[in-house]
Image (spheres, rainbow, N blue to C red):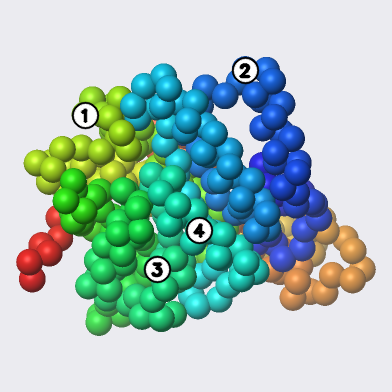
Amino acid sequence: MCLSTGNHTGYRRFKGTRTTPDEITSLYAGLKSALLTDFDVLLSGYIPSAGAVDAVAAIARDLRVRATQRRPGGFFWVLDPVMGDQGRLYVAKDIVDRHIACVRGGGVDLVLPNGFEAELLTGRPVGSVRMLADVVGVLGDLHDLGVPHVIVTMEDRKENGKAFMVVAGSSRKTDGSSRVWMVEVPLLDCFFSGTGDMFAALMVARLREAAEAQGLLETDGWMPPDTVPANETPLAKAAEKVLSSMQTVLEKTITAKDEELARLDQAQETTGGPRRDQSEDVGVDVGVNEETRKYLALTKASEIRLVRNWRDLVDPRERFKAQAVDLSK
C-alpha cells in the first residue's frame, strides 16, 4: 500500500506516487471505523520514507494489542526490510534507521533480509556476511535483537563455477539460541523483478499453513517447542514449499521469455514486423533509443508468469529439503 506505479521499477521507467505517512494512517483509521481490524498477519515490504515506516510500525503495534486480546498468537508481523542489495542502498539512511528500530522494538515476528540488509540491521560491516558461518552469526544477532524467526538469503558461488542461492533460517529456542537450517537453490541465468516480494508473500501463506499443521496458531509467535529439530520447524517446512514453487515458476518463466523474444525476432525476419527492440508493446516515445527498447522488451518478456502457473504455487512438486546446520562445529 506504500507505492502505486503503473509498472514495477525494474523497467527503470515508471510513474506513480509514494504513499505518505498521513495517508497510511488515514487508511488504517478507515479500517478501524468499519471494524475491519481482525487481521492475524501483517506483511510489510518496501516502505518509501522513515515516517511511513513509523506509521506501519504503529499499525502493527495496534493490531497486536487487538489480536492478543482475542488469543495468544493472534497476530504475526512479517517484515521484509527492502533497503538494498549487494552493498548498494535503495533507500535513504533514515529509512534504514527506522527499520533497525522496528527490529529492535520487539514487535517483528519474522524478518526476511538478504545478506546486505542483514548486515545493516545487525551493524556488521558491509561485505562481511559471505560464508555460512557468517549467516549463522547474523541469525543469532537478529534473535538477540528480539526477532524470533529469521530467514536470510544470499548468493553463494561454488568453486566449480556454479552459483547457488543460500537460504538459511532459524526459529529461536526458549533459551535464546538458534536452531539453524539451510537450503541451497541453483541460481537461474535470468534477471527477474519481484522475486523477493514473491518469496515474502508465499512465506506468509505457507508459514501459517505449517504452523496450523503443528497446532501452533494459538501459541505466541507460532513458536514450536524446543524439541522440534531445526529442519522440522514450521519455518523450514514453509521454506521448502515456497522455494519449490518459485524455482518451478521461474524456470517456466524463462521458457516463456525465450519463446516471446523468439516470436518478436521471427516476426521481423518473416514479415518485416517489429523486432524485439522496436515492438509497439514497449513504447513509441521518440526519446527511447534502441538500447532502451531492447531492455524494455527483455524486461517485459521476463515478467514472472504467476497466474498461468498457479498450480505450481498451490501444489508444488517437492524439490528442496531443508538441512539442519550443526552449530557445534
- Going by the numbered disc 4, the residue's amino acid type is Ala
The residue located at (62%, 17%) in the rendering is 35
Q: Circle 2 sits on which residue? A: 35
From the viewer's side, name the closer residue of 183 and 264.
Answer: 183
- Going by the numbered disc 1, the residue's amino acid type is Gln
Q: Which mark is residue 122?
A: 3
Mark 3 and mark 4: Cα distance apart in space: 11 Å
Q: Which mark is residue 228?
A: none
**Tag 2 secondary structure:** loop
**The N terminus is located in which quarter?**
top right
Mark 1 and mark 2: Cα distance apart in space: 30 Å
The residue located at (42%, 36%) in the rendering is 76
- Going by the numbered disc 2, the residue's amino acid type is Leu
**Circle nearer the N terminus (4, 2):** 2
Q: Circle 1 sits on which residue? A: 214
Label 2: how many residues lie within 10 Å, few (<14), some (14-19) or many (20+)?
few
Visible residue check, residue 231? no
The residue located at (62%, 67%) in the rendering is 94
**Tag 4 secondary structure:** helix
- Name the side, left or right, on which 167 lies relative to 258: left
Residue 24 lies, with reference to residue 189, above or below; the image says above
- Name the side, left or right, on which 33 lies relative to 241: right
Mark 3 and mark 1: Cα distance apart in space: 31 Å
For the residues carrying marks 1 and 4, which lies nearer the camera in this image? 4
**The C terminus is located in which quarter?**
bottom left
Q: Position of residue 119 (x, y in %)?
A: 41, 71
The image quarter containing residue 178 is bottom left
